[in-house]
Amino acid sequence: MAYFWACPPAESDDYIFNRHPPEQKIPKAKNLENWYKRLLEKGLQEHIVYNYKNIYRQAKQDNLLTPMALPYFEGDFWPTSIENCIGDVSYKDSPVAKKRQKSISGEDGGDNIACVGNSTAITRKHRCLFFSFLSLIFLDKIMRRL
C-alpha cells in the first residue's frame, strides 16, 4: 500500500530542486490531483496498480471511528493537522479564548475586533477538505477524549 498527498508547493517553496526556470508554472491543487489520478488510472490499465482510493472513501469504507486510524507518518500532513485540531479544541476552552470572545462581542467594553484564534494555519485551501471531513466524522470523538 502507498499513500500520496497531492499538495502543490507555495510560490516560494521548492521541494526537490532549489532552482527552476521562471517560466515553469506551479500546478494548482486540482491540476496536481488530476495528474495523480491520470497516473493511477494508467497504472490500472497497465496492471501496475491494483486499486486506489481517496482517503475519504477509504475512511468511509473502513468505518474509521478515530483519527488515529488514519495513515499517520511522522513529519507528514496528518500529525500536524490532528495536533492543530486538538490544539484548537483545547484553545476554545482556555481563559485567553474566553477573554478574546468577550472582546469580540463587546461585552468587556473593548473594541469589536475580528479574531481568527489558532486556526489560521488551517485556512489553506488544500487543508479544508481534511478539516471538513475531520469535523464531520471525528470531532465528537476528539472532544470526548479531551
Image: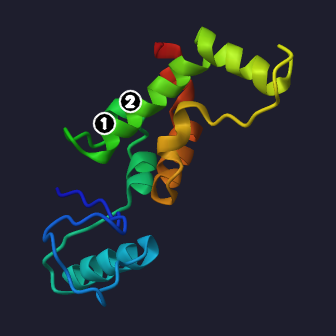
**How many tags in the picture?**
2
Q: Residue tagged by mark 1? A: 79
Residue 62 in picture, x, y percent from top left = 38, 44
Amino acid type shown at disc 1: Pro
Q: Quadrant of the N terminus?
A: bottom left
Residue 2 in picture, x, y percent from top left = 18, 58
Q: Residue at x 25, y 45 (%)?
A: 76
Q: Residue tagged by mark 2? A: 83
* Element under disc 2: helix
Q: Is residue 16 left or right of residue 51?
A: left
Q: Is residue 57 left or right of residue 123?
A: left
Please tell me whether residue 102 is drawn above or below residue 79 in the rendered image. above
The residue closer to the viewer here, 61 or 2, is 2
Residue 34 in picture, x, y percent from top left = 39, 78
Labelled pair 2, 1 in contact (Cβ < 8 Å): yes
Amino acid type shown at disc 2: Glu
